[in-house]
Image (cartoon, rainbow, N blue to C red):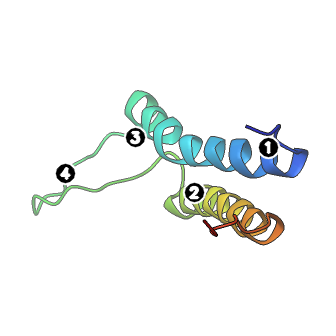
Amino acid sequence: MSELTTMERIGLYGGGALLLIGTVGIGLLEIALGAPHPVTGEGQVVHETLISISVRSYIILLGLILMAAYGVTNLLSKPPADTSI
């Protein structure tokens, strides 16, 4: 297998790291240090997050964009395989 270029490393490792941080990292942080879930007088649970849902979503989205950018550039830059017999 060929050696990865700098742009490929940014796309793959950066995108993968952002996806892991956005899902596993922030999830574990919420479990360990998350806000308690008080119950109102009507019996509804009030859910407060330690890190905003929009921030978490943007981290995951940025990871997906980096990985998609790698995929598109890899698709466009590699010559097609020879399918002749």
Give the residue at x 48% y 46%: 23
Answer above or below: position of 11 versus 36. below
Residue 52 placement (x, y as % from top left): 53, 56
CB-based contact (under 8 Å), mark 4 and mark 3: no
State left or right for residue 27 relative to residue 45.
Answer: right
User: Could you classify mark 4 by the number of other residues whose Cα lies within 10 Å: few (under 14), some (14-19), or many (20 or more)?
Assistant: few
> Which residue occupies the extreme left position in the image?
43
What label sits on residue 60 in the rendered view? 2
Q: CA–CA distance between discs 4 and 3?
A: 13 Å
Q: Which residue is mark 4?
A: 39
Quick one: quadrant of the N terminus? top right
Give the distance between the C-alpha atoms of the residues marked 3 and 1, in whole angstroms.
36 Å
Under tag 4, what secondary structure?
Answer: loop
Quadrant where the image shows the C terminus = bottom right
- Residue at point 66%, 58% (across, down): 67
| Secondary structure beneath label 2 | helix
Residue drawn at the location 64% of the way across and 55% of the way down: 63
Q: Position of residue 5 (x, y in %)?
A: 87, 45
Distance in Å between CA atoms under marks 2 and 1: 18 Å
Q: Earlier in the sequence, mark 3 or mark 2?
A: 3
